[in-house]
Amino acid sequence: MKLQQVKAEPVLKNISELPIGVFDSGIGGLTVAAALHRRLPGEDIIYLGDTARVPYGTKSDQMVRRYAIECALFMLNQGVKLIVVACNTATAVALPHLRELLRVPMIGVVEPGVEAALKQTGSGRIGVIGTPSTIASGAYQSRLRELAPAADVYGQACPLLVPLTEEGRLEGAIVDMVLKDYLSGMRQKNVEALILGCTHYPLLKPAIARFMGAGVELVDSAEATAHAVEDALLREGLLRTHGRGRVKCYVTDVPRQFNRLAKLFFGEKVSAIKTKVHLQALD
Amino acid sequence: MKLQQVKAEPVLKNISELPIGVFDSGIGGLTVAAALHRRLPGEDIIYLGDTARVPYGTKSDQMVRRYAIECALFMLNQGVKLIVVACNTATAVALPHLRELLRVPMIGVVEPGVEAALKQTGSGRIGVIGTPSTIASGAYQSRLRELAPAADVYGQACPLLVPLTEEGRLEGAIVDMVLKDYLSGMRQKNVEALILGCTHYPLLKPAIARFMGAGVELVDSAEATAHAVEDALLREGLLRTHGRGRVKCYVTDVPRQFNRLAKLFFGEKVSAIKTKVHLQALD
């Protein structure tokens, strides 16, 4: 019997060569993937949108934690070097829990958003808007108060803004009336910075800016998060600077409006998209 | 060795004693369960709301079919005598498929809504509103044209109405402006009847009636479906008339707003609710 010679593969690839994983409850997190791709064009990015179960923002904390673990396990199977939790609800409700369970470095959207907001304000009157779950979790509010105990922090849930955005309504009388309803209190309190605590909200930036007025800085977590990822990779010596990174997009369902929405959130046509995956369910 | 005597149980219970199963993508289908409970107070009702994956109306047809099969299998395990598909999207997209797979009698909300609408109209100008999936499926429109080939049928997707209702906004300037946006075309076409093709819409009935005007009959599928269930059970000799039926409610997630929404849709406090179940996932 002749023994077959097996060529030994190196056990560990150079870790910096591995992709970055970005997951979200749906397609909105592509705003974060796009910001990351612009800032770190050498990095491969694997995106996962849990479109079969979107939205997370109206579900229970327990359910959001379970879904987030399933998404993170998918990313581990893809062999990523770092996970970005692009969903504000998942970050607010599940990130501490994920960090207890898994050793891969993880970055959420709350911390970078908070830090960017604090850089903008003098007196420390800061507003944050998000889904009902994000606001009820108090994640933004408590982190702001931790880092700036003297800050005045105001939170406001805006449940209609996600469906408005997904319908493609970014301007117009209905949008203005809904914003007035949600943001009048915020405006009266003269906030200096307003954190857009949901991946969808940056698309409403022009309308929100018009309502809040020129003096109010709108903090886009997507940009701040891309910055935080760059810092983390530099610190760990894991930045990949050569070559041209690819963005590969997985979803758990391919809904009717998928192509229109993907283009809306990513800003350009995403290639290698629409690969449907099945998440490992936790029982 | 002593043989143990086993008391023989009758293999088949009297089928009419079995409960009716009602399932929906979420909590909205409680409007159908409530109508059924009012019309058939002797019947036990098992309700299942798939709150862990709500809404269905923006997901792909393939995904909605899969979720609907999982809900129907849950009902079979509960030993129901008849299944009501209370979700308009699931009825429109998945009911024909479910009927091919399963032998238990099934009633959806489209057919009863169509029949009720046709009873109301003389000339046959009929509108139907629903989620994007329901309207895109053409289920209402094609059934109307089958039964009344001369009818003029108009469909309109109204994606914001579900989030508005779930936020508790049933009246007010925002609701009026959204209705004007969706329904102006319908009003110009002078429809005589408007089918409310989503479980949530009956809650907006006063606002819709005000906008459409007194001459337009609003067809509530919940009432029409309860009527159809009664007819089917009478025809099969399966009606349970004695005693006081119980409504038992299962959900796949218990979201933050659950109690408020359940009361809103059921009209009274539901007892034996909040029992969380895990659906058998199809791979």
Image (tube, coloured by chain):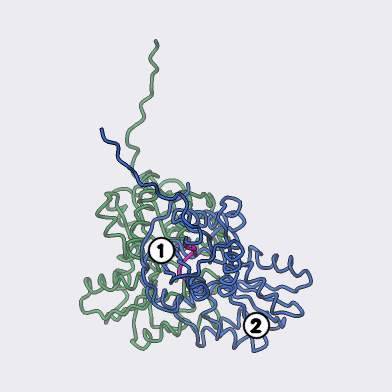
Chain colours: A green, B blue
Residue A225 falls within the magenta-colored stretch: no
Q: Amino acid at mark 1?
A: Val
**10 Å crowding of disc 2: few (<14), some (14-19), many (20+):** some
Relative to the observer, which residue lies in front, A86 or A238?
Answer: A86
Q: Residue A128's spot in the image, x, y percent? A: 35, 75
Q: Horizontal placement of B249 versus B147: left or right? A: left
Q: Which mark is residue B217?
A: 2
Residue A164 appears in the figure: no
Residue B22 falls within the magenta-colored stretch: yes
Relative to the observer, which residue lies in front, A170 or B273?
Answer: B273
Q: Horizontal placement of B220 versus A82: left or right? A: right
Residue at the spot 57% in from the left edge and 54% down from the top edge: B98
- Check the residue under mark 2 and report the chain it is in: B
Q: Earlier in the sequence, mark 2 or mark 1?
A: 2
Residue A141 appears in the figure: yes
> What is the quadrant of residue A153 in the picture?
bottom left
Q: Residue A63's spot in the image, x, y percent? A: 36, 61
Counting the numbered discs, the total is: 2
- The kind of secondary structure element at disc 2 is strand
Residue at the spot 27% in from the left edge and 55% down from the top edge: A99
Q: Which mark is residue B40?
A: none
B283, above or below A68, in the image: above
Q: Which quadrant is home to the N terminus of chain B? A: top left
Question: Which residue position is annotated with label 1?
Answer: B251
